[in-house]
Image (tube, rainbow, N blue to C red):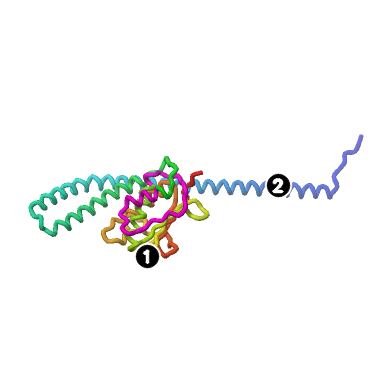
Amino acid sequence: MAAIPTATTFQVVGWTRWAIGFGGGIGLAIGVFEARAIDREVAAERARVRRDELQRERDRLDEFASVVSHDLRNPLSVAAGRLDLARREHPDDEHLEAIENALERMSAIVDETLALARQGKTVDETEDIDLATCAEGCWQRVDTRDATLETPGTATIRADPDRLSHVFENLFRNSVEHGGEGVTVSVGTLDGRDGLYVEDDGSGIPADDRDSVFDPGYTSAAGGTGFGLAIVDRIVAAHGWEIRVTEGAAGGARFEIDGVERST
């Protein structure tokens, strides 16, 4: 009967080391795979929690907007009617103008509160939009006084056209109202990443205020409602984008919007 060859001690040691190394490699690979899976699960859970928080916030805002619209519009209409009667009886009364201004401001706050609620809804459909053409059209619809618009370069992006127009119009108003006389406003795409910017050469926004400018009701302008930039922030979030404010090349305000899809 033939003898069965046996492994030498060196061979056994070699096989053992190979098995340990191979098993360790598999274990390491499994560990890395599991760690990545856990990271994905954690990220997905955080995203879900964030979506739920945003939805609850939108629901609260919708409810608040409904109450504001119902409870304020009717009294405002009554007050405006009474004001017209008072003007007929007292056409020279200087106090009536102050009352009219107050009513107009209250009406503007109601309108912008409703706009804030509507613009927070998620964008489901987007279109190809020429950035320069859209910006120039929005510029024509805003009281820009003696300000100037520059649109260097061309680009086509994907967005909801109506809501993108609201973004530009509100950012343009902000630049004109806060940038000073003869302010120049520029619109273009970000270098090295998907996104766009709106920048002016005005006085800028102090660093301590940059985290607050998107809060509803925040304003540093007399007579402002403080909803313009809040509406911008809602529209940006509804697209899945992100916005931040920084300092422009000339020291003015620069709003950068990241995550804007470029059309191919």
Q: Callout 2 environment at 10 Å: few (<14), some (14 to 19), or many (20+)? A: few
Is residue 226 one of those drawn in magenta?
A: no
Name which of mark 2 and mark 1 comes first in the sequence.
2
Where on the picture, by quarter, is residue 66?
Answer: top left
Dot 2 falls on a residue whose secondary structure is helix
Q: Nearer the viewer, residue 247 or 26?
A: 247
The amino acid type, in three-letter code, at marker 1 is Ser
Residue located beneath label 1 in the image: 203
In front: mark 2 or mark 1?
1
Question: Quadrant of the image for the N terminus?
Answer: top right
Instruction: Write down the region rendered in magenta.
Output: 134-163
Point 22% across, 53% down: residue: 104
The amino acid type, in three-letter code, at marker 2 is Gly
Point 74% across, 47% down: residue: 19
Residue located beneath label 2 in the image: 23
Q: Is residue 116 left or right of residue 106?
A: right
Point 37% across, 65% down: residue: 203
User: Residue 231's spot in the image, x, y percent?
Assistant: 35, 51
Q: Callout 1 environment at 10 Å: few (<14), some (14 to 19), or many (20+)? A: some
Is residue 162 one of those drawn in magenta?
A: yes
Q: Is residue 256 left or right of residue 24?
A: left
Dot 1 falls on a residue whose secondary structure is loop
Can you name the residue that lies furthest to the top here? 1
